[in-house]
Image: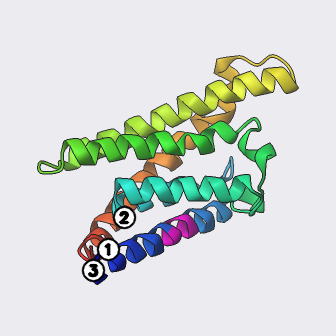
Amino acid sequence: MNNKDNKIKTLDIVYIAMGAALITICSWISIPFTVPFTLQTFGVFAVLVIMGGLRGLISILVYILMGLVGVPVFSGFKAGPGVLFGNTGGYILGFVIIALLYLIYEKAFAKHKNKIMEIAVLVLGLILCYVFGTLMFVMLYSKNVGAVSIQKALKWCVIPFIVPDLIKLFLALTLGKRLAPLVRNRD
């Protein structure tokens, strides 16, 4: 293994750590609104667009693992298995779905990347994240608190966040397109 291989691996580790840190910082920023929301999904989208699917996926996994072992990386400075496997933890776990879809998109369209397709993949990932999170919410909420319908869960956990999440997605794409060449050209 030559020195260049070591440098790339070290650079990957640095970028992955920075990605996990960005998602963490974004999860701590709460925007007061009718229903308050964080910038967590902005962090997820930005990391994927700026660093690429593989580094982004690993950053998200590191972020989730840090929260699982007790580092207060989740919104409200929360952490632990109780958060990750609690009523709304499925939405955090759903970030992995977004990253996997983005990674597949990058591999499948490596030579023919298309902005519309990229947006569609991220939106589809967000929808699947909502589906996974909502199903987990309904299952856990029904078990721990009492029966809740899918419609009620969507009203509580998804509908208020659709517009903010789409705005965060487009902001991340805009910022990411400017920063990605700086990060990816250092490979």
Determine which residue is flagged by label 2. 51
Q: Earlier in the sequence, mark 1 or mark 3?
A: 3
Q: Amino acid at mark 1?
A: Val
How many marks on residues?
Answer: 3
What range of the chain is rendered magenta?
A: 17-22
Q: Earlier in the sequence, mark 3 or mark 2?
A: 3
Q: In the image, is residue 70 above or below residue 139?
A: below
The residue located at (21%, 41%) in the rendering is 108
**Residue on which disc 1 sits:** 183
Residue under the image location 74 percent in, 39 percent down: 85
What label does residue 158 carry, if any?
A: none
The image quarter in which residue 31 lies: bottom right
Helix, strand or loop at mark 2: helix
Q: Quadrant of residue 174?
A: bottom left
Gap in Å between the C-alphas at discs 3 and 2? 19 Å
SS of the residue under disc 3: helix
Q: Position of residue 49 (x, y in %)?
A: 35, 59
**For marks 1 and 2 on the same chain, the one whose residue lies earlier in the sequence:** 2
Task: Check the image and report above or below for 135 versus 126.
Answer: above
- Determine whether label 3 and label 2 are within 8 Å by CB: no
Q: Disc 1 to disc 3, how far (Cα)?
A: 16 Å
Q: Are circles 1 and 2 on residues that touch, CB within 8 Å? A: yes
- Tag 3 residue: 4
